[in-house]
Image (cartoon, rainbow, N blue to C red):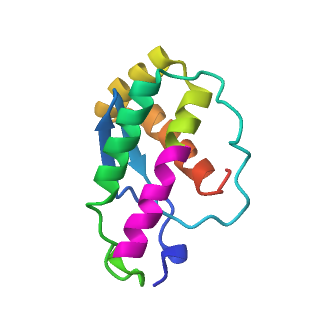
Amino acid sequence: MSIKSWLRGTAIATFCSANFLLMLTPVLAQDAPKDRSGPPRHPYDQAAVQRFLADCEAEAQTQSPPPGVDISVEQFRAFMVSLCPCLIWEIQDRFTPQEAVNLSDRLKQNDPQANAAMRQIVQSCIGIEE
């Protein structure tokens, strides 16, 4: 099975850092992503962004492709790392810092609406808008 055919809703990693808990869904982009070259609507403290990126990338480096996905470990990890900047940009664009902390708390409680919000962020980063 190729990574493109991997089920969209599968969560493969959980990241905890800078008060954010993320669930990632690694699917290769099918459509052009939106432009993220400008600043997000709610820029966060750069130290918090850098902590998030460092923790996200470190966690991504521990992941392996799911069984049956034909991609090397190195390629898979590189793909996972490549999502980190997009994820923090999307979070900053959609949520104020306090809203992001609240989202994190709700994700830790496995809140369905919070999970849906994170799924939308991941899907936006990989070019799947639903």
Q: In which quadrant is the N terminus drawn?
A: bottom left
Farthest residue in the left direction? 62
Q: Quadrant of residue 42?
A: top right
Residue 54 placement (x, y as % from top left): 35, 43
Residue at 37% x, 28% y: name it. Answer: 104
Whether residue 103 is visible here, answered yes or no, is no
Residue at 58% x, 37% y: name it. Answer: 90
Q: Is residue 94 above or below residue 82?
A: above
Residue 38 placement (x, y as % from top left): 71, 35
What secondary structure predominates along the stretch shown in magenta?
helix
Residue at 48% x, 75% y: name it. Answer: 3
Between 107 and 122, the one lying in front of the other is 122
Q: In this view, does 57 lie to the left or right of 94?
A: left
For the image, the number of numbered tags is 0
Q: Is residue 106 above or below residue 58?
A: above
Between 4 and 90, the one lying in front of the other is 90
Farthest residue in the top direction? 98
> Which residues, given as a range, are shown in magenta?
74-86
Asked if the magenta segment contains residue 85, the reply would be yes
Q: Quadrant of residue 50?
A: top left
Residue 89 placement (x, y as % from top left): 57, 37
Whether residue 69 is visible here, answered yes or no, is yes
Residue 112 placement (x, y as % from top left): 42, 36
Residue at 67% x, 66% y: name it. Answer: 30
